[in-house]
Amino acid sequence: MASRWLIILSLLLSALLLGITGWHAWDWHRVNDQMLSRRLQSINRVFTPSLAEAAQNEDIARVHQLLDRLTDDPAIVNATLRDDSGASRDFTGSAPPAPLATLPATPMSWHEDGMQRWIQPLGDFLALSSSRSYWLDLTLDPSRASKYSQSPLPALMPMLSLLLLIPAALAWRRSARAARHARSTPESDQATLAGNAEPLPTAREESNLTYMSHELRAPLSGLLGFCRLLENSPLDAQQREWLRHIHLASNGLLDTVDHVLGDPRRCRTNNVFDIAEVLWEVLCLQTPLAQAKRITLLAIVYDDVPPRLIGADIAVRQLLTNLVNNAIKYGGEGDVVTRIVLENREGSAVKLRLSVSDGGNATPANRERLRRLIAQGETRSANAEDGVGLAICHRLAAEMNGSLALGERRGGSQTIVSRLGFEACEPYVRPAEFDLGGARIGMWQPHTRLAHLLDYALRRWHALPRVIATADSLPSADDTSQLLIIGIDDNALAPATRDLWQQRFDAIPQPCLVIANLAPTKALDWRLPKGSVVLRLPISRYMLGRTLAKMLAESRQRAMPPRPACWSSTTTKSRSTTSTRYCPSLAPRW
């Protein structure tokens, strides 16, 4: 029985990794095509008119400078200027491709030998007619269009999935050996075993659990080893964020395996943990599924919830994962809001109320199904696929001296409430993590709930937030704001609004903290003001405060006047040397 479950679990994990690999490969290919299209549009707006003018004036130095700037883009392999005979007048990058027999009268693009070829006539960009005609010939490498294309993660995913098949093969071999042993056992011994109604010895059960735990931990430990190797490789910020999520998911899976199998050597029920950090890790891993359904995940941990709890953080992570995942799968578009509230405290014993509300718009059948599954508790229904997650949640809540119930329904939203008991360490009230020193911060956030949470966090950290009414008001915002917080979603990436946002960013003098509610593969290619930072949801409270504190410190440093230069002189006498250092800022004033 244990071997069969080990085989099934290993196959499921392998299929999951291969599925993630396929999805990322498709998504990266789509992102590359979009990035190439945007690059070509930008070239037509910025470079092509200047290149046409330089070619018309026979300014070869200027032409070469513009072509050289084009090939600074890693996606552009070669940039060539051709005349009406098709010959190359100048080029940068690799050797120019062979000229065409006929040059097109309109822009043309096609693929050849794994590269994209793009030819643009320059005559349309000249204010006056010219006796000579010129064309811009570009060779582009689609695999280098997006910075995510160079990630080593897709190449490692198949290796990791094959690694996970190892325990399945070992378990199959073990089960086959056991079957052969059973066939070789005399019938009298089999009858004796069949007539024995006593359970297997406890030592045998523990041996099976230890075997399963070991065979599952081995490939997962290998996965974590690859993560540590990748941490020392050249990755950009987004790839490091994905790697950290893989690391979190793998560690969480290791803990879950120990908890489910009940391995007595590894089960930990008295860990000290911060439930806000556990919730943030859960939301990070559920975000891709939520963003695919246009759902925003929000976390609200009240200040009177102690930051250091003692209990089974593994069980809390499993409980929150199941509840949030169900809210995403069975709810509609909108917000999935997780709230953690302190119900009461007696000494160091605390009772917390965890609630997860979906986005609403669920069908009546789903609402009735949820009510029925909550009512039946840990009892499994006749359908093996029905209510497994909620039955697990009932069991986990019971293990933590708690309960699971259906909360009050507001509008179309359904809420599941769990009350759990823990021990807490001092301090019993969550302190303010940062002090922003009265910094003036302008904020435009179209998401109402998120705007309220940001406003509360800024005031708690002694900042002075000011709400900006519309996005068009951002360039003309009060100059006394030291930085701006700007919320971005899919609407800002629409072709009609992308250029408008670039104009707004060009007119903003302050650094901006851009909070992006976007899928991680959607690139933000705007030119942002100096000192700006982009964060993608979900954002932990610590990550937000640390980023704001760093941005404010850098902004104050840039605003300081430059330090005056110092000069020094050395006077050498017969037996001594005297050095004099003079700084204008330290000179006395009369």
Image: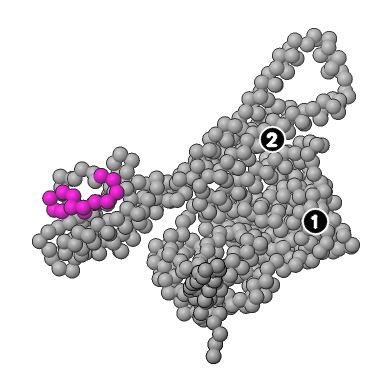
Residue 558 shows in this picture: no
Residue 202 versus residue 227 in the image, above or below: above
Please tell me in which quadrant of the rendered image residue 552 appears: bottom right
Where's residue 381, x and y in %? 74, 41
Quarter of the picture holding the C terminus: bottom right
Q: Is residue 94 magenta?
A: yes
Q: Residue at x 28, y 45 (%)?
A: 94
Residue beneath disc 1: 309
Q: Which residue is mark 2?
A: 217
Position of 12 relative to 347 (above/below): above
In-front residue for pair 316/152: 152
Residue placed farthest to the left in the image? 131
Q: Which residues are magenta?
A: 81-95
| Residue 197 appearing in the image | yes
The number of callouts visible is: 2
Q: Quadrant of residue 120?
A: bottom left
Identity of the residue drawn at 78% across and 63% down: 305
